[in-house]
Image (cartoon, helix red, strand yellow):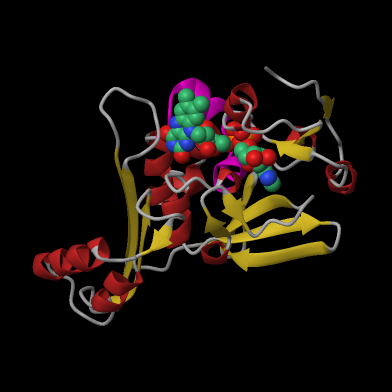
Amino acid sequence: MWRNFEYAVPATLSEAIALLRRQDARPVAGGTDLTMHLRAGVVSPAHLVDLSGLGLNYIRTDGETVKIGAMTTVAALLAAAEIGRNFPALLEAALEFGSVQTRNMATVGGNLCSAVPSADLAPPLLVLGAQVRLAGAGGDRALPLTGFFTGPRQTVLRPAEILTEIELPLPPPRSGSSFLKLGRRNAMTLAIVNAAAFIALEEDGRTVRTARLALGAVAPTPIRATNAETLLRGRPLSDSLIEEAAAAAALQT
Ligand SMILES: Cc1cc2nc3c(=O)[nH]c(=O)nc-3n(C[C@H](O)[C@H](O)[C@H](O)COP(=O)(O)OP(=O)(O)OC[C@H]3O[C@@H](n4cnc5c(N)ncnc54)[C@H](O)[C@@H]3O)c2cc1C
């Protein structure tokens, strides 16, 4: 049974933040996650604040950074040339994401703020070195995505704070990234396990300069497999090293 709620569509961030400061107010982005919880009675806000009027639906390159507005949909990620060209792991996660209908509605910000351990966009964004921008009554702040998740469905977001933007550094030369999702066949549901990797090589084209690995649905939050990252760094990449790193990643807690 749905509780009656007031629905507001503010046109500015400051208006949205003011509306969210009311008792029992909650932001809504694409609504794909929140609607399920409203239906199930898991949450019953008195006020819903729709973020669609805030101009947060964009992907743009600014110098060495690609900026993704929090209201950018998964479908928009798939359509953006700068995502496919620079961030294969993110593109692959978007390709594996739900159904066409879900991809058309689900937003990048909503996926991160839902903070479920299996959120498909979290591992690629973690390995791609994402930083998130938050706006609240106390002003704006930015932090690495690694510091965003605090537990299942929990983040560092303060009351009335809004995730506005995700920033990704353009990848260096001799680097690549990838995403894999293990899910139930024919089921457009959440991942059983998902994983992403980013590797940058030294000028010799063999030695690992940077390794970032992330896993989802294996811990209370999406996590970086730092054991395996340390093991890879500074060593020539080979099949046996990759197997060693995979074994280390499996032991990450
Ligand atoms: C059929 C179906 C299939 C799905 N498949 C997948 C899948 O394959 N992979 C996957 O990862 N997920 C999947 N999901 C889950 C869901 O679609 C995603 O997590 C989606 O990205 C949520 O985004 P949204 O814009 O719909 O968020 P919403 O439902 O609008 O919001 C989610 C939560 O985040 C908060 N929030 C949203 N945006 C912000 C913001 N900018 N600032 C602060 N708080 C915010 C809301 O208050 C709410 O608590 C699926 C869901 C359904 C129903």
Query: Is residue 57 visible to us here?
Result: no
Query: Is residue 166 visible to us here?
Result: yes
Position in image of residue 185 (x %, y %)? 25, 27
In the displayed structure, 214 sits above or below 230; it is above
Residue sitting farthest toward the left: 240
Q: Which residue is drawn at 61% across and 45% down?
A: 109
Q: Quadrant of the C terminus?
A: bottom left
Residue sitting farthest toward the top: 1
| Quarter, ligand 1 | top right
In the displayed structure, 115 sits above or below 28; it is below
Quarter of the image for residue 76 reads top right
For residue 157, side relative to residue 170 (left or right):
right
Of residue 185 and residue 40, the one placed in the foreground of this image is 40
Q: Residue at x 67, y 33 (%)?
A: 43
For residue 227, side relative to residue 4 (left or right):
left
Quarter of the image for residue 44 reads top right
Is residue 108 inside the magenta stretch?
yes
Position in image of residue 93 (x %, y %)? 40, 42
In the displayed structure, 130 sits above or below 2; it is below
Position in image of residue 16 (x %, y %)? 84, 42
Of residue 238 and residue 23, the one placed in the foreground of this image is 23
Magenta: main secondary structure equals helix
Is residue 152 inside the magenta stretch?
no
For residue 115, side relative to residue 11 (left or right):
left
